[in-house]
Image (spheres, grey):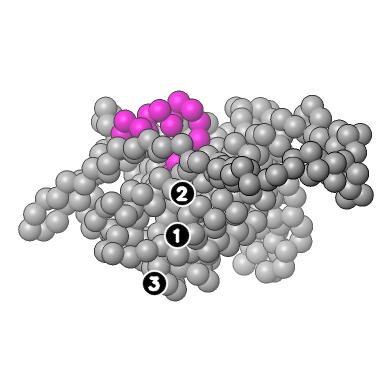
Amino acid sequence: MLERFYTKFFIAILPIDNGHELSITGIKNKKVLFKEHKRFEDSEPSKAFFTCIQKFTEQSPLYYIALLNPDPNQGAIEGCSSYDIHEEGEESGAKTLCRKEKWTLYTSQRELDRLKGRYATVGLDFIFSPFSIIEHFFADKISGDFAMYALAQKDSFSVAFFGNGKLEFAHHYPLNSSHMIIEESSVAGFAIDAVHEEEEKGIRLDDIENLDDLDIIDELDDLSDIEDLDALEEIAEFSEDAPTLEEERSHEPQGGELKEKMDRFNDDFLRFELIQKTLSKFYAGEHCHNRFIETVYIADAYGSGADFKRYLEEELFLNVLIRKIDLGDVVIALAQEEVGR
């Protein structure tokens, strides 16, 4: 009844790059009235951040605030058996959620409590996992053949294997250096035990092994058969297609542009290595069942460079589909689904 008189606000909070992004959607009588995006650079929620949210929550009693979970210690497991998941060294354990009676999400209970306190000024109605983002965004794909799916964020990389709508293997990689070190010694800091009626089976994910450096530079061809290098240099010097020194310098990236280009290259190469690492673990583990991954679907939230797709296709022989994703829109869509249940 209230929906006839009030605008319904859906607010998505995205912790990113030591700051926050807000996505706000206003809906009335099932019609989208507006969408807004705001960015705040403060690593901790600022007064301006809370004021922006309260500007909308004070207009209507119908508002829903959803957060994309930034917890580095989270993941997903196949099946919905009874799981005893505890954070190593912590008594608080983990919070689990069964998705569609097919697979289980888990995250640190201590981190959930911390997030609730961090945003207590406005309150949180929903906290969504990156794996729920993958499931929703690729809903048209995961019900089909077995494939790899990934969500690329600036500060994390989440990978999941789905076949016929069933999750079979997943891993969440925080890209913060301190958490990367933690992950090498214990997967996301969790030990996972699956409890069955007849037996208790312990599951502890293997330590992630370091990869050998990828050799992406082919060896130079043997030049011993070339009789006259001077002649080739002369041709190149006077070729109309060869750029002049001034032209080459004019196209060289300068200052901040060069740094941005190098950062992009490093980000792409890191994510390439994570996919390679995940495939190695999958093929060596019990989930493989002599299957070969042919296709990877990537939801790109940070803006990958052109070389990323090429790396995967040429070095790992994968079919690659990269879709740009607006995380705020997807978080809001998930919140709408929950409200509509």
Q: Residues within 10 Å of mark 3 (few under 14, many from 20)?
A: few
Q: Considering depth in this image, is 187 or 289 the residue closer to the camera?
A: 289
Asked which secondary structure carries label 3, the reply is loop
Dot 3 or dot 1, earlier in sequence: 1
The residues bearing labels 3 and 1 have C-alpha atoms spaced at a distance of: 12 Å
Asked which secondary structure carries label 1, the reply is strand
Foreground mark, 1 or 2?
2
Q: Is residue 242 left or right of residue 142?
A: right
Residue 217, horizontal then vertical, whole percent? 57, 42
Which quadrant: the N terminus? Answer: bottom right
Q: Magenta stretch: give its range.
A: 172-187
Q: Which residue matches tag 2?
A: 275
- Verify whether residue 179 appears in magenta: yes
Q: Residue 167 occupies which quadrant of the picture?
A: bottom left
Dot 2 or dot 3, earlier in sequence: 3
Q: Which residue matches tag 3?
A: 164
Q: Considering depth in this image, is 299 or 116 the residue closer to the camera?
A: 299
Q: Which residue matches tag 1?
A: 148
